[in-house]
Image: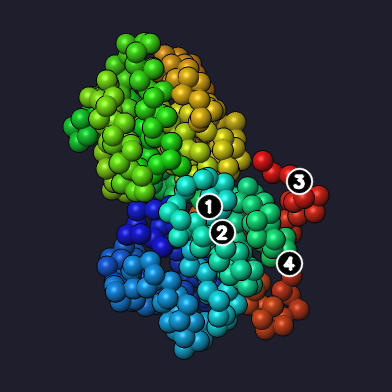
């Protein structure tokens, strides 16, 4: 489910594997990775430390991929006598359990955002996945918000769910030379003026690009500002609506669609941007706002889904369904250096809370716990979780 490295699940897998390999070196553990042929090069960093099992490319299409997970993967897990199998996306949960199985669920957007996916995927996510999820030995939720959704929509026991926040790579995302980054962005991407940046795949309606374009047009019309708007992300479901909105905009020359941006460029784009804007209608976590904060970029963000818990008090909050409200925040951040400096400082502090080393350590504890249960070990105890109070999970969630 890494989709050639161009998805949030990919960032999760890469970050988790890199950090896990460091833990495995010290703990006598061995990691096995199942990788599609054309994704092999993306895992060069793990080739000397993990066992790589190459899956034929013919299994990349969704239906064939699901069939491979349900049939071939359990057989391979048994053959390799794996102690624990980790499925890092709810879309590929398996029915047959060859060993204890852990799954990561990033969000349940199919229950929260209408028309998030096509009808077939909406049916699979709403009708099939809950049954598969309840068969897992343990589920990792990347946020408290997602854990609450799993409890509500899947009716899973709370003790079967652990909340382990995603991390970010602080060796990659850190404040740098912003002047150099701005010069680089002007040369490479034609961003020759201060700009608002949005890093997300071009997905409509969930990522909400069209309303942000509306807000930006109001901002430009009301201020005569030279600021630009840049979208960094590959085309996805509904991207034609976004491109059409750009084409008909009276400020089309100031709206730049950069396409999928290589990982090596993303941090410098954050450093070059005047501000980062994230008007998503729903997130199970939300990597980009935290990455931007870690690079010292002021963040304007929605608080939908898990975003409120991820950004804390370190972002300027917007109502993503109200372009007029968004426009007002764009104006404040574009014109007030004091506001930008305050958000930079708050963002750097917030970003330090998220680190892949901690995420990997907590995930390995889950592995060892479910493996211990399978072997009947007396030391395989349930995790302590301050949010486990039953009344919390019975709260009505809107």
Labels 1 and 2 touching (C-beta < 8 A): yes
Q: Which of marks 3 and 4 is in front?
A: 3
At x 29%, y 24%, the residue is: 249
Residue at screen point 48% across, 29% down: 300
Q: Name the residue under label 2.
A: 126
Locate residue 219 relative to residue 356 in the image: left or right.
Answer: left
Could you tell me how far apart the alpha carbons at marks 1 and 2 are, in whole angstroms? 7 Å
Callout in the foreground (4, 2): 2
Give the mark toward the camera: 3 or 1. Answer: 1
The image position of residue 377, as x and y in percent, is 72, 80
Residue at the outermost bottom position: 79
Q: Is residue 316 above or below residue 266?
A: above
Percent across and percent down for residue 330 are: 43, 21
> Residue 229's image quarter?
top left
The reply to whether residue 182 is in sight is no
Name the residue at the top extreme.
223
Which badge, 3 or 4, is on the more N-terminal residue? 4
Q: What element carries label 4?
A: loop
Q: Residue 95 versus residue 340: which sits nearer the camera?
A: 95
Lower sequence index among marks 3 and 2: 2
User: Pointer 3 and pointer 2: residues touching (CB < 8 Å)?
Assistant: no
The percent position of residue 39, horizontal first and vertical second, equals 30, 66
Q: Is residue 18 above or below residue 102?
A: above
In the rendered structure, find residue 382 and report the number of the disc placed on it.
4
Neighbours of disc 4 within 10 Å: few (<14), some (14-19), many (20+): few
Where disc 3 sits, the SS reads loop
The residue that label 3 is drawn on is 395
> Nearer the observer, disc 4 or disc 1?
1
- Which is nearer the N-term, disc 1 or disc 2? 1
């Amino acid at each position: 489910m890494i989709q050639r490295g161009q998805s949030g699940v990919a960032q999760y897998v890469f970050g988790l594997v890199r950090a896990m390999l460091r833990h495995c070196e010290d703990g006598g553990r061995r990691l096995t990775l199942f990788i599609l042929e054309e994704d092999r090069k993306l895992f060069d960093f793990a080739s000397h430390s993990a066992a790589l099992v190459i899956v034929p490319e013919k299994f990349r299409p969704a239906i064939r991929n699901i069939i491979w997970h349900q049939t071939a993967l359990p057989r391979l897990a048994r053959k390799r006598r794996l102690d624990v199998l980790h499925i890092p996306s709810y879309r590929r949960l398996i029915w047959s359990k060859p060993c204890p199985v852990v799954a990561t669920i990033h969000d349940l957007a199919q229950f929260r955002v209408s028309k998030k996916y096509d009808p077939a995927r909406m049916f699979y996510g709403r009708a099939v996945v809950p049954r598969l999820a309840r068969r897992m030995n343990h589920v990792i939720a990347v946020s408290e918000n997602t854990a609450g959704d799993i409890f509500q929509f899947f009716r899973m026991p709370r003790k079967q769910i652990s909340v382990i926040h995603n991390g970010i790579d602080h060796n990659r995302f850190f404040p740098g030379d912003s002047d150099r980054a701005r010069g680089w962005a002007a040369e490479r991407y034609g961003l020759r003026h201060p700009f608002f940046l949005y890093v997300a795949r071009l997905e409509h309606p969930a990522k909400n690009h069209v309303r942000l374009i509306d807000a930006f047009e109001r901002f430009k019309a009301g201020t005569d500002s030279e600021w630009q708007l840049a979208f960094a992300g590959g085309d996805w479901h509904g991207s034609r609506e976004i491109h059409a909105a750009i084409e008909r905009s009276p400020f089309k020359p100031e709206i730049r669609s950069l396409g999928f941006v290589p990982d090596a460029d993303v941090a410098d784009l954050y450093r070059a941007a005047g501000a980062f804007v994230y008007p998503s209608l729903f997130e199970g976590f939300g990597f980009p706002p935290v990455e931007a904060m870690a690079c010292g970029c002021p963040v304007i963000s929605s608080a939908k889904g898990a975003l409120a818990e991820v950004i804390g008090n370190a972002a300027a909050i917007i109502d993503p369904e109200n372009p007029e409200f968004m426009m007002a925040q764009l104006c404040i951040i574009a014109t007030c250096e004091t506001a930008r400096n305050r958000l930079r400082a708050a963002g750097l502090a917030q970003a330090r809370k998220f680190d892949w080393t901690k995420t990997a350590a907590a995930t390995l504890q889950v592995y060892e716990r479910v493996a211990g249960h399978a072997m009947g070990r007396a030391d395989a105890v349930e995790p302590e979780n301050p949010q486990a109070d039953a009344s919390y999970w019975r709260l009505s969630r809107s």
